[in-house]
Amino acid sequence: MILQLLRDYGYTITVDEAIEIYRSTAMCSTPDEIKTAIKTIISKNKEEFVMFDEIFEQVLAKQRNWLQELNNELVEINRGYIPHELTHPDMELLQANPSCPQPIGGIAVGAGTGLATITGLVDPESLLQFQSNYKQVFKKLMTEGVSAAADTIVNRYLTAFATNFQEIFKTKEKILDHVAQVLNQINPLVKRQVMGLLEEEVNRQLAEVISKNPKLKIQSLENLDFMLLQDTAEVRKRLYLLGKKLASQVKRKQVKGKHSIDMRKTIRANLQNGGVFLDLKLKKRRKERPRLIVLTDVSPSTVYATRLFLTVIEEIKTLFQNVQYFEFIGSCINVTSEYKDGSSINESIENALSKWSLVNSGKQSSNYQLALQQFLQDEHLKLTPSTIVIMLGDLRDWLGGWRNGKPLSLNSFVKIRDQSRLFFVLNPEFHSNWNTGDSIVSHIQNSGIQVQEVTTISQLEDSLKFILSAVS
């Protein structure tokens, strides 16, 4: 998709701008006029204006039938916002709403934008025919916007009576799924714009409420969802202690291991005792420390878990003779030097993320096929039979290719598995969401690679204990 390609390079293209492109290109007679029209509409500053020509020549112009593809894409967007009896799939549903004779006005959605502004539904009660529960959420969404709707979800439906976090999370998912279904009935494009903002705002407000509510703090940090753990001194201390605890357990096992008697040294040491072995000399057990490679997904959906995970890794890295760090989304980079040079783990994480932004300008979508190919081709990669590889990622391969019903990235997963001592994937996504949409979890598990859910500190501790058993 042409517009999606431009978004991947960092351009912010709202639905309103897409419609403007549709209207403008309809009046253009040559490809150059179309190019100029698009550049003028989507460029927000001088840098984007200049960069567009290079992107167009290097990427867009090389797309076969790019004009036809762009036209098809724009027509689909416009169809969603200017319904026609013969083309709009939800026309009967929309016509049933008397308050919506000209539905879907089509503007960019902000946190304070009321849904009535977006959809053209002037009367808040008119939306209620699409649902039977959570009426206050829809009223707020219609009249006051995303922030007010999120406040209603959090304070009226989630935290008013509940003291159990699991109950809160299940209810939150139920409400958001219901809202998404209703918005999808109105228009899928509106749903896509609103739901991302709504879920983000609900998570933010819920985290604030939990941090201030004594009833909800009954739930220990170990069992709180990663998404609700704020970067506080209390959380950092807990992760620091977890890392120290895991490292100490491994070292104790190594010390307690049985040692065989060194007969030669024992005899020599006990000659003065007339051959009676009063002083036994033991052979020191020599065990080579394994190498560690850490592969972390730094996409917006998982970076919160990456930060927590790397904080623990910092405290157990002394168990390994060498640690290498890599970051990936749609590509992969080596950030080992950033972790060696940082004065603290927080500084190292920020330096590594800054390098990612510098090397990979613009937004990327997940592509495990390309990312792991680049990982395996890294000239500094030290992948040996003594290497333990830990990947933290949700295994959502949005742009990766497929062949014969299997993701092409599977070949790289198998190569890493075969060339390492242990390959383990920590998935910060709830198990109930695995193998939906673009998830490739089942394919990875079927290849013999273990995948473990890590949505809480407690689960992270259990997984790392298992991995570290290969060290002790």
Image (spheres, rainbow, N blue to C red):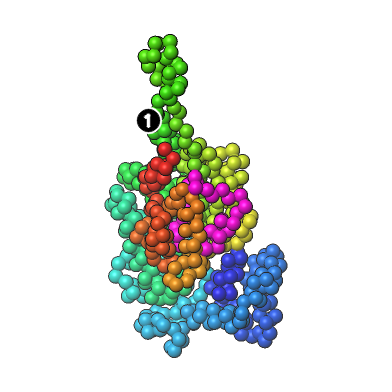
Q: How many marks?
A: 1
* x and y percentages locating residue 346 in the rendered image: 54, 43
Where in the figure is residue 356, as x and y percent of width and height?
59, 54
Nearer to us in this view, 108 or 228? 228
Circle 1 residue? 258
Residue 24: x and y in percent read: 62, 81
Residue at the farthest front position: 275
Taking the image as shown, residue 80 lies to the left or right of residue 213, namely right
- Left or right position of 21 against 30: left
In which quadrant of the rendered image does the N terminus lie?
bottom right
163 inside magenta stretch: no
Tell which of 395 and 408 is nearer to you.
Answer: 408
Tell me which residue sits at (43%, 76%) in the image.
187
Q: Is residue 392 on the magenta stretch?
A: yes
Q: What are the residue bounds of the magenta stretch?
A: 368-396
Q: Nearer the viewer, residue 341 or 141?
A: 341
Can residue 6 be seen by looking at this rendering?
yes
The answer to whether residue 311 is seen in the rendering is: no
Residue placed at 50% from the left, 60% from the top? 412
The residue lying at 60 percent from left, 62 percent from top is 362
Callout 1: SS: loop
**Can you say whether 446 is above or below 132 in the image?**
above
Badge 1, how many Cα within 10 Å: few under 14, some, many 20+? Answer: few
Which quadrant holds the C terminus? top left
Report the residue that reaches farthest toward the bottom: 86
Amino acid type at image mark 1? Lys
